[in-house]
Amino acid sequence: MQFGNPEKQQAEFLHAAMHQAGISTGDLWLRYFSLGGSASEYETDAYVQGIFRLPEVQRDLLAQAANELIDELPPPPRAPYSEDFLPGGARDPLQSDRRNYPPA
Amino acid sequence: MSSQLPLDELSLVFARLKGLLLTEEKVDRAVQLLAEAAKDAIPGTSGAGVSLLNDQGRRTSRGATDAIVEQADVVQYELGEGPCLTAWASDETVVVEDVASDGRWPLWSQAVASLPVRSVVSTPLRTETGSLGALKIYAAVPSVYDAGTGLLLEKFAMPAATLLANIQGRETPQRISEALIAALAGRDSINRACGVLMERENLGAEEAMQELLRLARTQKSPLHQLSADLVQAASAGGKPGPG
């Protein structure tokens, strides 16, 4: 890994995290704005693209906003066990409405 | 707090900034182009028009290829009856063989008797949440259109309605208002928490924000939650909060 300008890296890794989590710049900016951020959506987008500089506290507020959005994402689905498919189990095929029963 | 803010206006400004709403001029332009395309596409048509209606059946936007269409339309909305209002209200395509002999809208038929408007097809601009308005075509002579023309116009109206619904979703301003209220309330709460830290730790505004961010990280707590806790602890007796 290249060790370049840490400011730029902070933006790059923010971009990568957003991409991985499927967070749009608009969503990020709205959360950042609600956390007291002062950069515009346009400036935020330029920063994420690595073509605009923001002060440290604004960069950290964007990181906080992104991490809060990431923490709110639903966890990836878990694999079911054999017993989940038994009658009354979480994935009993006879249960027509697939309510999310906790595994027995 | 929220009720004192001019939220309707703020919401619109905010929505435009976020690119969620187009300006009225852009909607009018889209509607105008739709009317022109309908006229060009359907043989025998002398004029076409589009009306967007609100929940009460009042017109909010319009486009027409010529003054005759516009005139026939204005009368319709003044009288509160006519093929477009019927198409919009019943959610069904209306085909009129001859305006002069059709008895469904006596006042309107009488009012447009002097205009070159004899054949009409009007179809609702349907969306999932209801009808946005109507798209209609007129011809100067009777019996130009049949049920097949109705089906053709419906095909035309469907994608147009979907696009128009995205330009002007009825629930958009409401949704924006809620997001805006939440965002402004969030900023308030964080500013108050920064004030508490500035007072307590003798910090500048920027240092207070940095301290707040540091606390959120070490306590693994969302910034809004942390801020609310800090403000509550401060107002409960000025005791040092967590930290």
Image (spheres, helix red, strand yellow):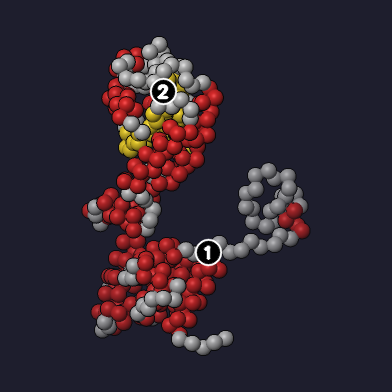
Q: Are marks 1 and 2 in contact (CB under 8 Å)?
A: no
Q: Is residue B188 visible?
A: yes
The residue sitting at 72% across, 50% down in the picture is A92
In the image, B47 versus B194, the foreground residue is B47
Respond whether the residues carrying marks 1 and 2 are from the same subunit.
no
The residue sitting at 38% across, 56% down in the picture is B19
Mark 2 chain: B
Which residue is labeled 2 in the image? B139
User: Quick one: label 2, few (<14), some, or many (20+) residues within 10 Å?
Assistant: many
User: Quick one: label 1, few (<14), some, or many (20+) residues within 10 Å?
Assistant: few
| Res B103 quadrant in image | top left
Q: Secondary structure at mark 2?
A: strand
- Which corner quadrant holds the N terminus of chain A? bottom right
In the image, B48 versus A8, the foreground residue is B48
| Res A59 quadrant in image | bottom left
Numbered badge on residue B115: none
Residue B49, compared with residue B98, is above or below; it is below
In the image, A73 versus B66, the foreground residue is B66
- Residue A104 pos. (x, y %): 69, 56
Q: Is residue A93 left or right of residue B78?
A: right
Which residue is labeled 1 in the image? A22
Q: Secondary structure at mark 1?
A: loop
The disc labelled 2 sits on which kind of residue?
Ala
The disc labelled 1 sits on which kind of residue?
Gly
Q: Nearer the viewer, mark 1 or mark 2?
A: 2
Mark 1 chain: A
The residue sitting at 35% across, 36% down in the picture is B63
Q: CA distance from mark 1 to mark 2?
A: 51 Å
- Residue B225 pos. (x, y %): 39, 68
Q: Is residue A15 left or right of residue B25?
A: right
- Residue B114 pos. (x, y %): 30, 16
Residue A45, compared with residue B56, is above or below; it is below
